[in-house]
Image (cartoon, grey):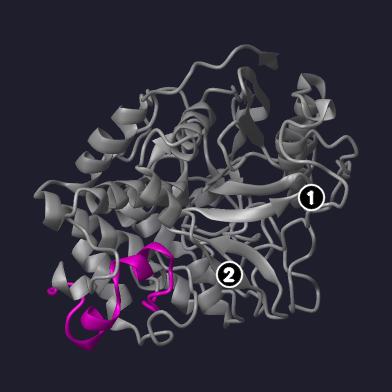
Amino acid sequence: MPHTRPADRPAPRLRRAGAATAVALALLAGLAPAASAAVQEGQGAYGQDTARRLDPTRLQAGLDAIHEAGVYGVHSGVRDGRRRFDGASGLADIATGRPVRPDLRHRVGSVTKTFTAVAVLQQSAKGRVDLDRPVGDYVPELLPGERGRKVTVRMLLNHTSGIHDYIGDAFPSLLKGTTESLDEHRYRTIGPAELIGYGVARPQLFEPGTDWSYSNTNYVLLGEILRKVTGQDPEQVITRDVIRRVGLRDTYFPGTDPRIRGAHARMYESFYGIIDPPRDYSDYNMTWAGTAGALVSTPQDLNTFYRALLGGDVLPRRQLDQMRTTFDVKDPTGAVTLRYGLGIYSLDTPCGPAWGHDGGVFGAGTWALSSPDGSRQFAIGYNLMKYQRVNEAGTDFDPHPADAAMRDYRDQALCGTTTPRTPDPAAKNRPTEAPSAQAQAPADRPVVLPPTTPALPGPLAGPLR
């Protein structure tokens, strides 16, 4: 049941690509950004309109709409000053009927990138990392030669390095047209040097600093820079300097442990209908994501984190300002879809810009956004991924009612909008059955995707977005 209560004060591609590339980047990189809502004329900023106060009834209805549109389970936290809403809808386990709870732990994918960026910026504040210094000065063995001299730390942080993503090579069946690698590598431990090697071995996407392309290789490299300048494991550095400093209780790196500690939902992957019925990937060795996307957290912890970060409690002002210096990310028509900073992005909502990140790994999606001053935010987790379907012509993805419901919930949570669209609960793409024994075998159907990636709820949806 939803409830409100005072919140605790926190502690002191956009380009077109072939099917194989679309699959690879749909996994972890964050697919093509979805068009964001434009700021509506005549509406004020956060908190200036009493209509934008938290409405538990409408927020719960928004979560129910997402579930009714086809997502198995969804859980969320919303905060406005000292007021707080925690709610959930649907199932954590479709085999047993266990309901989802607001405080379940969840794999948050590329929301991890904000944490990693904060740790790098903390080292920058201490004079140990120069954002405009070549990456080769720190880790020459990982980015050798001319690229190591041209790519800077800042380019890794804002995805303007031009370094290729490693996902396709880390899960090679995807490049051959099947998803069997997802099962073959479920319990594999893979090191950061190997992941970086996959991305660096691919041709440069563009001249460093001249364009934008989301790449998980960037953030694994940043982890290794942290290792070099601190002499410590980067996940331990992020845990000590970011997670513990903010006082987060349910956020941690799982290391090589494939299980999630504590209460959590099952996490189901459909892969655009290739895995049918969707398969449970809640147990997974996340070393393939590392400092780019391995974190486990809760909506409540993410809200606490972004409130502390944007409120100025985690970084000095100079570093926070650099974090919020952005690169315009555009769709094929030239329209700006979001503005990517250093491990954080800004997009427009009906009540103004919001800051945060989204994340997606096999079976688990997350979205966390905040008002610019950290006074109002929302975070949401959901346990069915890549539920969209390719249209009959094979040229694009059919619109899915869950995507619209997710965006409506975002606007209700952040802005208090009062006219949400109601998704059709009878949508043809809605999955209705639990995974069968047959679904546990490696998928053998070819992955056939159109040349564009779907506009998922978060702007950077994917296998590790």
Residue 150 in picture, x, y percent from top left: 28, 82
Instruction: Say which label, 2 or 1, has the lower sequence index.
Output: 2
Residue holding disc 2: 328
Res. 164 image quadrant? bottom left
Q: What span is colored magenta in the figure? A: 139-164
Residue 129 in picture, x, y percent from top left: 21, 58
Q: Residue at x 57, y 65 (%)?
A: 31
Q: Nearer the viewer, mark 2 or mark 1?
A: 2
For residue 223, above or below residue 354: below
Residue holding disc 1: 404
Q: Residue at x 75, y 41 (%)?
A: 411
Res. 52 image quadrant? top right
Q: Say few, some or many: other residues with alpha carbon within 10 Å of mark 2 (under 14 / 14 to 19 / 20 or more).
A: some
Q: Residue at x 40, y 87 (%)?
A: 207
Q: Quadrant of the N terminus?
A: top right
379 sits to left or right of 155 = right
Helix, strand or loop for disc 2: strand
431 sits to left or right of 185 = right
Residue 456 appears in the figure: yes
Residue closest to the eye, 241 or 198 = 241
How many numbered callouts? 2
Residue closest to the eye, 463 or 325 = 325
Q: Is residue 152 magenta?
A: yes
